[in-house]
Each structure stands twice: as structure tokens, then as C-alpha cells.
Image (cartoon, coloured by chain):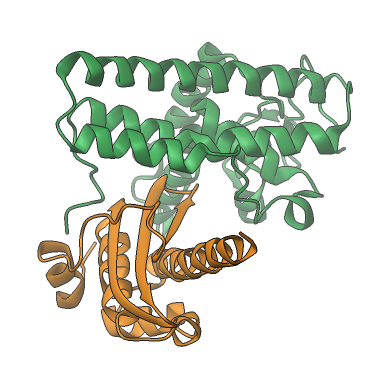
Chain colours: A orange, B green
């Protein structure tokens, strides 16, 4: 399958690979997967106030899944939580020129963003309760 | 007929032209009659096999030989447009064999044949609690220089997981095909098990040191 140059670039030079400690108060973690290919994607955000100041990912999957999550971390940085939730998989498809058979990889990345933000919000709510 | 029985006979097709029984539904080799509309038949009917999870591998092998002979390109030599036909027959046969031979693919396919499947399960990505986190941990471990002993342990575990899934899927189909239990619940459990298969296979592959063939651009 032919990958676009942007996918290859993100694959060869993935941005923000790695992990934050998920126990840290200012970190939100989303782990999602796609049963049809057995890919696992972990996306983490570091938040100050309402703003995402840093992001990390670790993806075990195809080139497009790696590129999608790499791009997702870049797109999230600097955004507020609500702005991050506004990132749609179609934005990723467009930016990476993903072919139809790889659209589910971008969906996975969108799911990971939502899961990371949801995790952060849930942890904050829990902390607020004491 | 929507129910299947473990030992049911293959439906089979009778050629409308010569009255003989056909092994390959789209084509009667005996009288050279083509049934184009039958190429879209479900994979079991297409190659004259009973719709069951418990297919005899030897029967599949025999069917492959028999039908391959019937649709061999040599049989169509010199007939206009027939070379393409031979190719499409072979492709149609290969598709059926590929899906029906492999137990997980066969289970997946059988599940998809249930009329309720689309509304009930098609979009189900259900996994057991904690499953993804555990898989992620294993992949990170394999990626992060686990000891050789640990790698082998992970590999063996993944293999055992796959064997257990296959055994349980077989058990669930046995119940379904004999009409025992709640079919909806049985299908849901099959779905839950099949959703785990690719993860186990990926862990197994990573533990063997094989790179994911899809990973490299």
C-alpha cells in the first residue's frame, strides 16, 4: 500500500513518542484499540488550567495508526480541553491524505483524544470530591 | 433456512440444465452451464458445504481439488471471454477457501451470516475489562527489552490464549448449532472472544521478534 509523504514523515520521525506517569495529577491517559487489526494506542495529555501543554503517545499498529496518533499529539498541544475535543478524525484524514481503508486509524486517534480528555476530567472531578 | 445443524448435509445445487449435483454453485462443469448470480452466494453454499463451524478440513481439501479441476483455465481454452470466467471462478473459490479454512475467519463469517448481526453486533468492539491496558503493557514490555525468558513466557501465553479462544468459540458454536442456550448471548460471547484474537496474534508476533508487516510504510 502506498503511504502519503506525510504518513511516512510521521512514521519515520514520530512526534512526542513516550509516556507521562499516569498517576500525575495533571495527566490524562486514553488507551484505545481496534479489534479488526489489534492495534493499541495510548495517548496522554499534560494539562495546565484548561490548556493542554504537552502530549505523548505510544502506538502499536500500522504506519497510519502511528502517524495518526503522532499528528494527534501535535494538534492537541496548546489547545484547551474543549478545543481538543473539537478535533475530528476527518482533520487527520485530510492532513495525512489517508486512503479510505485507513480511515479507521484516524477514528482511533480521535477516540484516543476523547478518552484522554475524559480521563483527565474524571480524575479532576475525583480530586475535587476529595 | 436460518438454523444449521452440526451434521446437516450441504444444501448443494442441482443443475437446472442437466440435473446433476454441482459442487461449485456458479458453474456446472458437467454441462458447462454458468450461473452468474450464484457467485454472490454465501461462501458455504458457494462450494457446496454445510453451514457449520465444524467443517472437516479434509473435506475442504477435497473440495479445493475437485472444484479447481472443474474451473481450471485449460478447460476454457479457445472460448471467447471464458478465460476471464475461469479467473473469476478461481478467485471466488479461493475467497471461500481462505475464509472457511481458518477457524477465526470462519467464526467471524458465520457470525456475520446471522440476520440479527448487523443490528446487534457489527459495531461491537467490546473487550473484557482491563484487556487493552494489559495488552499495551505486554507490547511495551516486549518493546522495552524484556529478558529472553520473559519474552518466551509472553509468547507461550499468547499462544495459549489463542488456543483457549478457539476452543471456547467452538464450544459456543456447538451450543448454537444444537439450539441450546440463548443465541443472542452466545453470539455476543463469540464476538467478545473474536475481538481479542488480533491482539493476541500481534503479541505473539512481537514476541517472536517479527515486525508487524503493516507497520513499515
The residue shown at (12%, 71%) is A9
Q: Left or right: A96 with respect to B79?
A: left
Q: Position of residue B140 (x, y in %)?
A: 27, 39
The residue shown at (64%, 19%) is B168
> Does the image show residue B131?
yes
Q: Left or right: B192 with respect to B70?
A: right
Q: Quadrant of residue B136?
A: top left
The residue shown at (54%, 26%) is B103
The residue shown at (51%, 12%) is B58
> Which of the pair B102/B17 is nearer the observer?
B102
Q: Position of residue B44 (x, y in %)?
A: 65, 34
Q: Quadrant of residue B134?
A: top left
> Which of the pair B51/B208 is nearer the observer?
B208
Q: Position of residue B149 (x, y in %)?
A: 20, 13
Q: Left or right: A31 with respect to B117?
A: left
Q: Quadrant of residue B113?
A: top right
> Which of the pair A8/A116 is nearer the observer?
A116
Amino acid at each position: 500500500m502506498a503511504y502519503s509523504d506525510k504518513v511516512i514523515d510521521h512514521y519515520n520521525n514520530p512526534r512526542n513518542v513516550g509516556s507521562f506517569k499516569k498517576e500525575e495529577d495533571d495527566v490524562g491517559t486514553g488507551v484505545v484499540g481496534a479489534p479488526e487489526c489489534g492495534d493499541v494506542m495510548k495517548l496522554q495529555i499534560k494539562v495546565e488550567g484548561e490548556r493542554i501543554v504537552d502530549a505523548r503517545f505510544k502506538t502499536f499498529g500500522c504506519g497510519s495508526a502511528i502517524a495518526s496518533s503522532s499528528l494527534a499529539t501535535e494538534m492537541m498541544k496548546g489547545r484547551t480541553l474543549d478545543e481538543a475535543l473539537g478535533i475530528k478524525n476527518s482533520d487527520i484524514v485530510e492532513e495525512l491524505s489517508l486512503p479510505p481503508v485507513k480511515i479507521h486509524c484516524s477514528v482511533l486517534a480521535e477516540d484516543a483524544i476523547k478518552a484522554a480528555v475524559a480521563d483527565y476530567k474524571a480524575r479532576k472531578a475525583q480530586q475535587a470530591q476529595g | 433456512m436460518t438454523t444449521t445443524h452440526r451434521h446437516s448435509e450441504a444444501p448443494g445445487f442441482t443443475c437446472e440444465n442437466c440435473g446433476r449435483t454441482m459442487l461449485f454453485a456458479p458453474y456446472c462443469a458437467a454441462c458447462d452451464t454458468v450461473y452468474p448470480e450464484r457467485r454472490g452466494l454465501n461462501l458455504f453454499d458457494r462450494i457446496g458445504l454445510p453451514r457449520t463451524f465444524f467443517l472437516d478440513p479434509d473435506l475442504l481439501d477435497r473440495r479445493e481439488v475437485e472444484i479447481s479441476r472443474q474451473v481450471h483455465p485449460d478447460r476454457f481454452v479457445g472460448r471467447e471471454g471464458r478465460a476471464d470466467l475461469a479467473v473469476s471462478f478461481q478467485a471466488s473459490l479461493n475467497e471461500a477457501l481462505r475464509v472457511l479454512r481458518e477457524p477465526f475467519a470462519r467464526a467471524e463469517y458465520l457470525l456475520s451470516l446471522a440476520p440479527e448481526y448487523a443490528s446487534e453486533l457489527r459495531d461491537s468492539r467490546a473487550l473484557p475489562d482491563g484487556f487493552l491496558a494489559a495488552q499495551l503493557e505486554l507490547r511495551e514490555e516486549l518493546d522495552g527489552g524484556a529478558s529472553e525468558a520473559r519474552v518466551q513466557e509472553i509468547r507461550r501465553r499468547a499462544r495459549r490464549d489463542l488456543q483457549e479462544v478457539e476452543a471456547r468459540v467452538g464450544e459456543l458454536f456447538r451450543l448454537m448449532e444444537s439450539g441450546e442456550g440463548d443465541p443472542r448471548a452466545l453470539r455476543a460471547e463469540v464476538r467478545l472472544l473474536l475481538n481479542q484474537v488480533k491482539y493476541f496474534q500481534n503479541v505473539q508476533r512481537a514476541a517472536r521478534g517479527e515486525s508487524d508487516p503493516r507497520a513499515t510504510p
